[in-house]
Image (cartoon, rainbow, N blue to C red):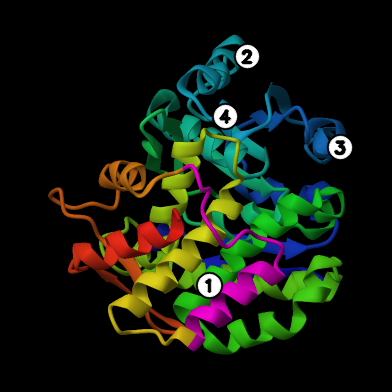
Amino acid sequence: MTTTLTVALGARAYPIYIGAGLLVEADLYRPHIVGSQVMIVTNETVAPLYLDGLRTALAGYHLSEVVLPDGEQYKTLEVWNRIFDALLQARCGRDCTLIALGGGVVGDMAGFAAACYQRGVAFIQVPTTLLAQVDSSVGGKTGINHAAGKNMIGAFHQPRAVIADTATLATLPQRELSAGLAEVLKYGLIRDAVFLTWLETHMAELLTRDADALAYVIRRSCEIKADIVAADELESGQRALLNLGHTFGHAIETGMGYGSWLHGEAVGVGLCMAADLSARIGWLSETDVGRIRRLVASAGLPVEPPPDLSAERFMELIAVDKKAVDGRLRMVLLRHLGDAVVTGDVDPSHLHATLRAGSC
């Protein structure tokens, strides 16, 4: 069964298709492809598994492809430029369509290339990881990393469709599955306490890849994200809530070297640190913090930052976070479970206490 959601952005609204076996459904692609030239962007891990199936679904188009190395450490300007090399070699015009086949790194890089090539061309997201299916493929955030900060170079560029084939999760390594669950937990924490409780009682089913449980969390996560993106596409307000745990998480990824920690692993720790800080300013109880830590751990994720990342280094990395406004750091914190807020009024002593506790 296919579930269809809509990201309501007026004339640029687009569907999210969720279901098993969708990757090879030719009829899903046709309404969203512009022109006859299609460039598939994928990576060395995903290509042997799913590239042939996608080629078959796109029979009749002028197809070309670029296969990138796999990993966050390759989300760089140099590797990103390979997409342009391939587009120009294939003589793709302004009416071409890029299709991102892979996880969050592929989707971010292909989407950013689509935003820039000939000042903007169409693209479609075909996410093959849980993290990409519940989060990064939806909402139009695209970009690449810089040595000084994650996703610091990029653009908002919405896809024309998201085709989330849940069957691709069967080949996902367990570590990657857990990483995706960090973003799922985020949605419950920021918007839906009932969903959070459901996750507590169904985590075992998710970790054993129960099809119905996974389909539900993908749908609910996309519903929440689609609703927030439709209300605030360019992150001028409530969309920033989607960054819960990410200020801390991005600091871990940058500080430890891209690819050392998976994004979801770093976000899992970030959720725990955001909970700790929320408690220090008097919003969450210690019981709430313990509940969040247990839930993150139950997903197979770390709950403590790397011990060799000092509080001082954390502060250096957080200072260049792209969510800062006029040099003032904005934090996403929790007033209650299921109720997040963006604030620029955090007492520095509370933030330092959270960082020192995490680096002990």
If you read the primary sequence from the N terminus, does the residue marked by circle 1 or circle 3 appear first?
Answer: 3
Residue located farthest toward the top when viewing the structure as drawn: 89
Q: Nearer the viewer, residue 192 or 304?
A: 304
Q: Label 3, on which residue?
A: 49
The crowd level at tag 1 (other Cα within 10 Å; few <14, some 14-19, many 20+) is many
In the displayed structure, 257 sits above or below 170; it is above
Query: Where residue 113 sits in the image (x, y, percent)?
Result: 49, 30
Label 1 sits on what residue type?
Answer: Tyr
Left or right of 219 on screen, residue 324: left
Query: Where residue 325 sits in the image (x, y, percent)?
Result: 18, 53
Label 2 sits on what residue type?
Answer: Ala
Label 4 sits on what residue type?
Answer: Gln
If you read the primary sequence from the N terminus, does the residue marked by circle 4 or circle 1 appear first?
Answer: 4
SS for callout 4: helix
For the residues labelled 2 and 4, the Cα–Cα distance comes to 27 Å
Q: Label 2, on which residue?
A: 90
